[in-house]
Image (cartoon, rainbow, N blue to C red):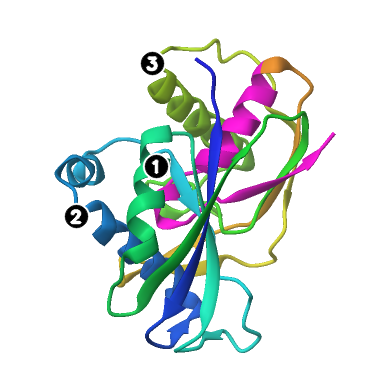
Amino acid sequence: MKIQVYELRLKLYTLADITYEDMLSVETAFIDSALAKDEIWREFHETNCFKVYVLNGMHPLEKDGIYKKDHIYTIIIRTVNPELASYFSNILRNHYTDKLKGLTVENRIIHKKLISELYTLTPVIIKSDNGYWRDKISLDEYERLLKENLIKKYNEFTNQKINEDFELYTYIKFINRKPIANLYKEKIKLLGDKISIKIADNNMAQELAYFALGTGLGTTNARGFGYCNYVPM
């Protein structure tokens, strides 16, 4: 199965002030309500499965952490699902909630290239049984869960089971000094980390790194977590 990463650049008009901490929650409420307008996509949204899309925060950044009412900002949504990309492109340009109104959507495909490094622009969420992973699990366990989660998403989307005996990356770096908190479903704070990983030089690692551009790293990607950019080789 050939994977393609679809990118939608969505311009949004703000109908209220939005704090940085609330930003991803407000964005995902906007997208969730758009999915709910169609029976098939509402069922998709409500089904317990990997959603294979991810989004980043609003740009340009606001230095004071407040995205201002009556301003225009841009968010980027990526997915490996062509039908979902098409639906988002059609519905989001005219969709609105009490806080956001869609204006325009620009579409492109991120063509596959050799990837040297992935780095996340929104925090990666790795869930342990006791919440935030630090002081709960080891770094080795964290890395195992990071790789395992990406493989599970890939297997489910491609309907196959790949050989997991390969090196995904050769180096991992945590960019933040302390956990980053973001609001989840407007009431829960999730703690995560921004990371960069040096992608290994093998075919499966390169395939999964490209896949991660359209799905995100870690869990809760449809809430805006684990959104990646890359450094080409």
- 3 lies above or below 62: above
Mark 1: few/some/many CA within 10 Å (<14, 14-19, 20+): few
Residue 189 x/y as whole percent: 40, 68
**Residue corresponding to mark 3:** 159
The magenta segment: 204-233
Q: Which of the two marks, 3 or 2, is nearer to us in this view? A: 2
**Residue corresponding to mark 1:** 86
Give whichever of discs 3 and 2 has the lower sequence position. Answer: 2
As shown in the figure, which amino acid type bears the numbered disc 2? Answer: Lys
Label 1 element class = helix
Give whichever of discs 2 and 1 has the lower sequence position. Answer: 2
As shown in the figure, which amino acid type bears the numbered disc 3? Answer: Asn
Label 3 element class = loop
Give whichever of discs 3 and 1 has the lower sequence position. Answer: 1
- The residue at 19%/55% (across/down) is 37
Q: Is residue 116 left or right of residue 135?
A: right
The label number, if any, that marks residue 37 in the structure image:
2
- 21 lies above or below 7: below
- The residue at 34%/65% (across/down) is 94
* Residue 137 part of the magenta segment: no
- The residue at 46%/88% (across/down) is 70
Frontmost residue, 174 versus 114: 114
Frontmost residue, 33 versus 108: 108
Q: Quadrant of residue 210?
A: top right
State the quadrant of the C terminus.
top right
Q: Is residue 141 visible?
A: no
